[in-house]
Image (tube, rainbow, N blue to C red):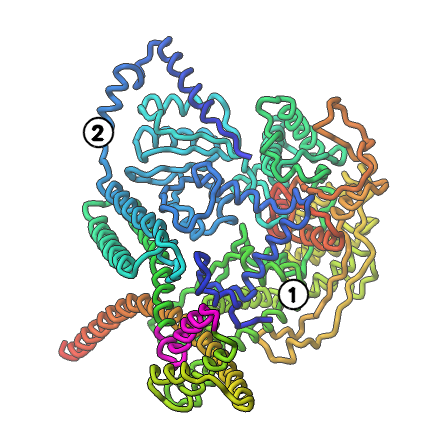
Amino acid sequence: MHALWPRPSGLCFRGDKGSHVIPSLSSPAGQWLVGAKMASAAAATAAAAAVAASIRERQTVALKRMLNFNVPHIKNSTGEPVWKVLIYDRFGQDIISPLLSVKELRDMGITLHLLLHSDRDPIPDVPAVYFVMPTEENIDRMCQDLRNQLYESYYLNFISAISRSKLEDIANAALAASAVTQVAKVFDQYLNFITLEDDMFVLCNQNKELVSYRAINRPDITDTEMETVMDTIVDSLFCFFVTLGAVPIIRCSRGTAAEMVAVKLDKKLRENLRDARNSLFTGDTLGAGQFSFQRPLLVLVDRNIDLATPLHHTWTYQALVHDVLDFHLNRVNLEESSGVENSPAGARPKRKNKKSYDLTPVDKFWQKHKGSPFPEVAESVQQELESYRAQEDEVKRLKSIMGLEGEDEGAISMLSDNTAKLTSAVSSLPELLEKKRLIDLHTNVATAVLEHIKARKLDVYFEYEEKIMSKTTLDKSLLDIISDPDAGTPEDKMRLFLIYYISTQQAPSEADLEQYKKALTDAGCNLNPLQYIKQWKAFTKMASAPASYGSTTTKPMGLLSRVMNTGSQFVMEGVKNLVLKQQNLPVTRILDNLMEMKSNPETDDYRYFDPKMLRGNDSSVPRNKNPFQEAIVFVVGGGNYIEYQNLVDYIKGKQGKHILYGCSELFNATQFIKQLSQLGQK
Amino acid sequence: MAVDITLLFRASVKTVKTRNKALGVAVGGGVDGSRDELFRRSPRPKGDFSSRAREVISHIGKLRDFLLEHRKDYINAYSHTMSEYGRMTDTERDQIDQDAQIFMRTCSEAIQQLRAEAHKEIHSQQVKEHRTAVLDFIEDYLKRVCKLYSEQRAIRVKRVVDKKRLSKLEPEPNTKTRESTSSEKVSQSPSKDSEENPATEEHPEKILAETQPELGTWGDGKGEDELSPEEIQMFEQENQRLIGEMNSLFDEVRQIEGRVVEISRLQEIFTEKVLQQEAEIDSIHQLVVGATENIKEGNEDIREVPHL
């Protein structure tokens, strides 16, 4: 897997006039980490129709350009350093943090990065780049900065478009402070969304209360409030498409919040396209988008078509981390207890270590395994650890060989290759260290997840729920599991029951229901979510038949696995080695129908919007008969990693097609249950 | 894509100005305002620090330009067939090396000075952080430019080492060069026949066989006119053998070159790491010293306890 020899180009140091190779420490020997970058770069450039190839790249490029004083960024190894200060608000922070690390910010010349609403001291003679939302408070604070003359020059970048009146407020403050010439540039960045993965985005993090499932679905919402929520969502989606550089064809179901979003979005896009002077979708803004001959498909779905998936227990790595640990904007926070030791009486109580890790695109292990079933992940960590140890031994062995140097002539011939070996070993040291760090990281994370799995018997839940959702016969009665004191927290039981309730064709009889309720209350559950689900079920029954979840099953494999045999850290005894079978969740099915232009009663009466068409009426008959190459699925009301993973798996089988997944907020089951229970309380 | 609304902003400024004038509101802009602006500008801390930082950067920039300008000539080796125009003498190269080194030293001293002064008189944490980061950037810039210098110097040193090795290896190469010049002379005179060639080829063999003074051999070679066919064949075989040996020597030399380059690179890496560790070891030393003192004091305190 690894090659320790440097490429011959490292030796063409001499002779070539003018062309000299600077041997770099990051060894060119196609290693692990370098391979990831190359692979992703290759993937991005490979597909010609890759408009939707990587929203992350696009956003990162846009950010870097903004940080470079709004001029495209070119790397120059002997360029003069230029320094600047970055000021952001919490929105800006959430957008930047998954994309650029502090080191990358430093590389762009940023000496300080500060929150807008913090105490900031005047720093003379330095340009400041602002990246904020155009809200009242932010504008006020910016005007204050101008009055206090904090910095030398100001580059103002607004995350979404600023209104004319607010712009005049700033102009006013600038005039009053005689700072008009200091305001060097003002830009609307249209970056009001957070990209978490190459193909996944979320609308916002800071004010997700505003656009949460609960906010959209509560019964006491007023029209104006709904309008505000919809406007927020549409604004972000608009920014998304501006950054993507494409105008989509929109399809949505009728009678849902998704429809409202679709109507508004269509209107906004249409207005922008008509306005020939200021249109954001013409000319050079399209960029790479011009290479695709087809426009992407935007499928707007409402959370209400599938409430079981957010409650589902899961078995893939990323989804598990999100479900079980504190995982937020690609950062996971772990609490580690510092081991069992005898502490002498009177000593200070041991503090729990808090550790947080960033799971980034550079982390090749994460990229490879975030969608894998958990046992596979455990095995892979073992494998990585073993290969790392082998490499470490190799390096250590060289130390003993080096001891021979200078002893006798015979040894010198043995050394002939060793200089090269030594060079490559030394140059591969940074990579080895990085590898070690990642292995440690994943060992910790996976161990934490495993502890939860074992404590709550999550594998049992997962298997059971899969069976319920695919309508196969159940070997254990639901009541048994709920009453079982060992298996899972009250929340797990609630989730299980809700899934059952959602998925059954006929509601359980009153007597049964009472039994279940009693069992649940005994186990310590709060029954409010059930209230809400009852209402929801009644409502959806009226609207349409409930969606089915597909008809495949999971096959539990035996308890024996290689992991156990090698006596590894990940002792998975008692944990079933379940294998996921591909089944399409409702959202994936809808996407499949729409993308492949299949006829299906579920999706046939979806509305159709095309902002580019001159006549602004929608028809249910799509103009375009060809299957789409790119699609964007957006769930209004919230989404999660299970759906994302399902879509990724679905599209893996199809060559040349790309999917992006987005949602108005990202919640795990705990957060969703909380929202349901709030809704059920009313 | 981002939209530049700077012009829109300027337009807003104008709008606000006219509106304020119409409303009769006193505004910072206007005739008084411009004077105001100038007045306000001058007492602003002109940033002694940043102007000096910029000076250092422009110095480093000059160094970089200087190096890049002469780089081609510097590296362009030692080829005697090059025209006079592009060539650089060794003394010139030495001069460049020296100048560059002095320059780099002054720059890094300037940076150190700035670092020491940066934290005086400043109470704000943010400004301190900012200045440290700025100085880091400047140092990084200097390092990158120094890399240019060290690369071309490494090439040059390598060439010198090569030359020395070649000249030290064995006497043949010397005579070989002399032979080649002599064979040039020989071939120049058209009256010589092919028998002379075996004569010149004979030389290396004779030198191998007996370590005779070159001139003597040379004189001998010139004198001989005829050789018997067996001798010719023998000489030819010797010839082949010698060629084979030369080639293998040549390969070995190449290998050694490669190794030397790698070793020098490794040494660079090691020195860098050692220097890094020096700072850390210093701090560890401090900590240990502090810890020992703490423990001593602790022990004393404990000893005092029974006295109470």
Q: Is residue A392 left or right of residue B286?
A: right
Residue depth check, mark 1 versus mark 2: number of the one nearer the observer: 2
Residue B42's tag is: 2
Query: Camera-side residue: A414 or A308?
Result: A414
Query: Camera-side residue: B22 or A306?
Result: B22
Residue B254's tag is: none
Secondary structure, mark 2, is: loop
Q: Crowding at label 1, few (<14), some or many (≥20) Cα neighbours within 10 Å?
A: many
- Which SS does the magenta portion mostly show? helix
Residue A664 showing in the rendered view = yes
Q: Is residue A391 left or right of residue A659?
A: left
Q: Is residue B29 magenta?
A: no
Q: Which residue is mark 1?
A: A374
Residue A600: image location, x then y, percent: 85, 42
Where's the C terminus of chain B, which quadrant? bottom left
Q: Is residue A378 left or right of residue B70?
A: right
Marks 1 and 2, how far apart in space? 65 Å
Residue B43: image location, x then y, percent: 20, 30
Secondary structure, mark 1, is: helix
Query: Camera-side residue: A664 or A216?
Result: A664
Q: Crowding at label 2, few (<14), some or many (≥20) Cα neighbours within 10 Å?
A: few
| Quarter holding residue A606 | top right
* Magenta span: B164-191
> Label 1 is placed on what type of residue?
Phe
Q: Residue at x 47, y 21 (%)?
A: A165
> Label 2 is placed on what type of residue?
Ser
- Chain bearing tag 1 is A
Outermost residue, front side: B191
